[in-house]
Amino acid sequence: MLIEEIMKTDVYTLQPGQTVQDVVDLFEEKRIRHAPVVDGGKVVGVVTERDLKDALPSRFSVSPKINAYEKLVSEIMAKNPITAHPMDFVEESALIFYEQKIGCLPVVSQDKLVGFLTETDLLYKYIELTGAHQPGSHIEIRVPNRSGILYEVSKVFYNQHVNVLSVLVYPDKKNSSNKILVFRVQTMNPLAIINDLKKEGFDVLWPNTPQMNE
């Protein structure tokens, strides 16, 4: 999946010559926590909610507060931020978020801002990919790490006429020769599927109730 498929294109921006008060107003009005700073369409910085908090005095401070709100955006922004391109892969961008401990990525093409991606956007896309936003059941199965195993498991769902909403594959932390398959299926009663999976010899990890083990 490419960044251009999930990035916001209607981006609220700031300019270096605006003030901290402008940032406060923008964040409150638009209910956002990050904004790119642009100068002539070029990204020169990013301001986050944390930058804003660092720039403002504590409520317990005895120093005058007016000067803090008159500071320029150029004084509090993170300069030369990491950027992405619309054709970058979402998975690679997620790794950048994790490794660099950032909360947003301006998306740039031909040296101009064309979009904006936040950690919230990534989280919602993960929710969509896992099917967690749709009614259904969660099934986890431990399988041997070999070719064709996903097809064998999928046949059980096919025979039960159950639609698979999503499939995730994880390594088995206890045994590297196995994988954990996590299915989200479009049924609220997976008992028949669980029974058929067990009949086929698959190790069902979840759901795993006493009634199912009888």
Image (cartoon, rainbow, N blue to C red):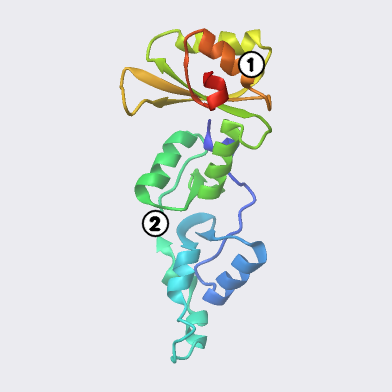
User: Quarter of the image holding residue 139?
Assistant: top right
Which x, y percent locates residue 6? Answer: 59, 39
User: Quarter of the image holding residue 131?
Assistant: top right
Q: In this view, does 147 lie to the left or right of 17?
A: left
Q: Residue at x 50, y 46 (%)?
A: 108
Q: Which residue is drawn at 66% across and 29% down?
A: 136
Dot 1 lies on which element? helix
Which x, y percent locates residue 77? Answer: 44, 66
Q: Mark 2 points at which residue?
A: 80
Q: Which residue is drawn at 58% across and 38% down?
A: 127
Q: Residues within 10 Å of mark 2 (few under 14, many from 20)?
A: few
Closer mark to the observer between disc 2 and disc 1: 1
The numbered mark at residue 192 is 1
Which x, y percent locates residue 109? Answer: 51, 43
Which x, y percent locates residue 134? Answer: 67, 34
Q: Inspect the image, locate mark 2, and give the three-letter code of the amino acid beneath it.
A: Asn
Q: Image quadrant for the C terminus?
A: top right
Q: Inspect the image, locate mark 1, and give the three-letter code of the amino acid beneath it.
A: Ala
Q: Residue at x 37, y 15 (%)?
A: 145
- Give above or below for 79 relative to 189: below
Q: In this view, does 83 lie to the left or right of 165?
A: left
Dot 2 lies on which element? loop
